Amino acid sequence: MTWFVAFAGANGLMAVAALAAGSHVLKSRLGPDQLSWLTQAANFQLLHALALLALAALMKSPQSIALLSAAGWLWMAGILLFCGSLYWLAAYGSGSLGVLHWLTPLGGLSLMAGWGLVLISGLKSQ
């Protein structure tokens, strides 16, 4: 549980820093597509930082801890893969991922799978 609180803080900090850098420092240096990728990555990262924080607060029963912990790890993988690949695209351009272009959708699937586990945990607690 405490790992997810720490992950929430780290991801929230990085997302806000990325948004601030995009708005103030990088706005004139990045093209419209790159700025869009940066903003999308930071928004997804910030949203999931808040979700990780809420997840840590919800971990109360042994049943919920297993599912919610798995959800948290899937979200962390999704943040790294989805947001990380978008940050990479923002920094290096659209052709820069090469054969690793599958990182973005794999990260998105990880984020969705995490939300699916939250759904299952909620349904099981009824």
Image (tube, rainbow, N blue to C red):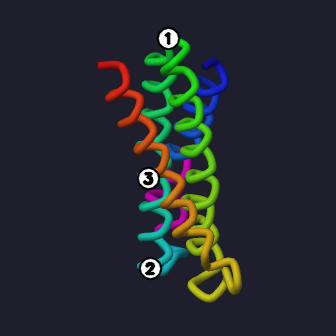
| Picture quarter with the N terminus | top right
Q: Check disc 3 and report its element: helix, strand or loop.
A: helix
Picture coordinates of residue 106, whole percent (x, y): 57, 65
Q: CA distance from mark 3 to mark 2?
A: 24 Å
* Mark 2 residue type: Asp
Q: Earlier in the sequence, mark 1 or mark 2?
A: 2
* Mark 1 residue type: Ser
Instruction: Give the magenta range.
Output: 17-27
Residue at left offset 50%, top offset 64%: 38
Please name the residue that numbered disc 3 is placed on.
112
Q: CA distance from mark 1 to mark 2?
A: 44 Å
Please name the residue that numbered disc 1 is placed on.
61
Where 19 sits versus 30, above or below?
above
Residue at left offset 49%, top offset 11%: 60
- Verify whether residue 33 appears in magenta: no
Where 43 sits versus 13, above or below?
below
Q: Which tag is nearer the camera, tag 1 or tag 2?
A: 1
Q: Decide: marks 1, 2 in contact (CB < 8 A)?
A: no
Q: Decide: marks 3, 2 in contact (CB < 8 A)?
A: no
Q: How many marks?
A: 3
- Verify whether residue 24 appears in magenta: yes
Along the line of sight, the residue nearer the viewer: 17 or 109: 109
Please name the residue that numbered disc 2 is placed on.
33
Q: Which mark is residue 72?
A: none
Picture coordinates of residue 79, whole percent (x, y): 57, 51
Along the line of sight, the residue nearer the viewer: 90 or 114: 114
Q: Earlier in the sequence, mark 3 or mark 2?
A: 2
Residue at left offset 36%, top offset 36%: 119
Q: Quadrant of residue 7?
A: top right
